[in-house]
Image (cartoon, rainbow, N blue to C red):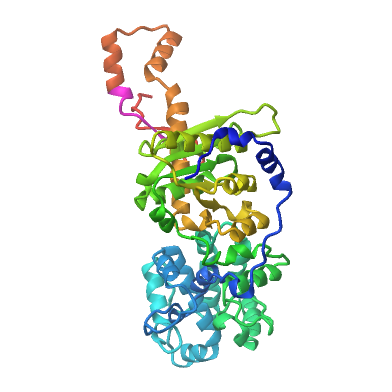
Amino acid sequence: MSDFSIGSLLDDDKRASLQNFSENLPTTTQRTQAETPRSKRDIVSRVAYLIGIDDRHFGIDQTENMNPQFYRSVYDEMNADKEARIVRNLCRLRTKLQRNFRAIYTEMNADVKNLDSMPDLVPQDALRTLEQDGIPFVRAKRRLEDYIVDVHNYLLPHVPNCQKFIPEWVKWAYIRNLFFIQRGNTVEGNKEAARYYNEARDLFPYQAYINWYPDEGDGNVLRDDAKFLPILYERNRDRFYDMSKVTDAGDAAVQNADEFFARAERVIIAVDCENADPCKVIGVVKELEAQGHVGKIAKILLVDDEHTSSQWRALRRDENLPLEYYLTDRVKDEKSAVDVAMTIKFYRELADAKAAGRPIDSAVIISSDCDFWPLIELTPEINFLVMLEYDNCSQAYYQRLQGNEIPFFYIDEYFMAGNVELKTEIVLQEVVRDIEEGFLSKINLFSIINRALLKLDLKMTDSELSQFFDKYIAEMNIAFAKNGSAILQNKPTLKE
């Protein structure tokens, strides 16, 4: 490692770079056609699962040489979830009921059969799985038209529960619209939709029945995320702008944190708390812990602003982490000092580590703020990994990192699978803390008893007070109603 000093930050040229960078991003080298990032298939795999695309397209029960269109890992993840299974099997049924309507109708009326006795026309495994998941779909004396309406009505409460499988940067309403048609709770509404579907069935994705008006020029809209999302947004009179979200960053960038930590000796993680989602960052740190990378982390530096989120408490409570939390105040209300503070703290950590004979060779910057580019550019002796967020990273910064072969990835993806559970954990911790330190800390039953005695002009000896508490008060507890109100339970029986 080459020599450096904190004082170098005060050089005129470097100060100018820090001040002017965000307004003057230089042009990056254009990527050649051969270097075009590969499109991902994560979103289309999730949509394909939910709308009931056949298992074989996920490579299930196929030969090892099969190149499936969709990700098997996504299938396994979603198939383990009851809500996702319900939606998938309802959509599979709806497609078959609409596609085979005449044949099913004939068997139901001429041969007096029900859906569970037509294996050639209706997927029996879908019926069985739905029943196991709490939806006994088949009923006696049910018309075929009513079964199709049943699918719509069953989907209504279950589709919203699958939002957790779609990244936050995708507009969920557009995905949700695929499952519901206008007047879908009526026979007439479904007949109208079925008429259009059967006329243009080959244009629907894998002939799956969804709320869609395909165009002959669309081709396979579920080919990959880069094709699907722009068309989906266009159908909703919107535009999908950032294609970087649906493509791989390229082979030059290290996309896996495991690779980065495998090459690192000692790492500092610097977090711009003002420009990072606490839940996602906490998720990343938990994942690093789970992968056994904490031993290489010299310091996790959280630099926060007095106006930002209290969620960082959930990370600060982890005593196993080499963590420092630095809170900056504001000289002017409209001006944050986080960028400067984080840069100075970063260089001090490097200097202190070198002086102690344990130099830091690698650094992780968790921020989508392009103002930290000079820190990366002016410290070539450090191997950097940048963690970004989809919604907060500018295209210019993305191109700058890519053009200079600085490894980066989106933390939205790194901990997407556990994001919902993590949010639950963080919110629960905060709620419990507020209840214990706020609500419950203000309640003392002996004080309440003494106030009652004073109000009634009565007295109790210490012995009487203790007996009164043990017999009547100790067994009571506080519960919470669905509207959030506190309710006293196990109240002693009082004489009328």
Residue found farthest to the front:
2
- In this view of the protein, can residue 428 be seen by the observer? yes
Task: Say whether residue 423 is left or right of residue 292.
Answer: right
- In this view of the protein, can residue 430 be seen by the observer? no
Between 276 and 311, the residue placed more toward the observer is: 276
Number of marks in picture: 0
> Relative to residue 409, is residue 382 depicted above or below?
above
Between 296 and 436, the residue placed more toward the observer is: 296
The stretch drawn in magenta includes residue 82: no
Residue 312 at x, y percent in the picture: 49, 38
Q: Residue at position x 40%, y 45% from top?
A: 266
Residue 492 at x, y percent in the picture: 33, 27
Q: Residue at position x 35%, y 39% from top?
A: 320
Residue 295 at x, y percent in the picture: 35, 45
Residue 162 at x, y percent in the picture: 50, 62
The stretch drawn in magenta includes residue 472: yes
Image-quadrant location for residue 472: top left
Image-quadrant location for residue 458: top left
Q: Residue at position x 48%, y 35% from top?
A: 351
Q: Residue at position x 57%, y 71% from top?
A: 39
> Relative to residue 392, is residue 118 depicted above or below?
below
Between 85 and 477, the residue placed more toward the observer is: 85
- Magenta region: 471-479
> Relative to residue 112, is residue 458 depicted above or below?
above
Quadrant in which the C terminus is drawn: top left
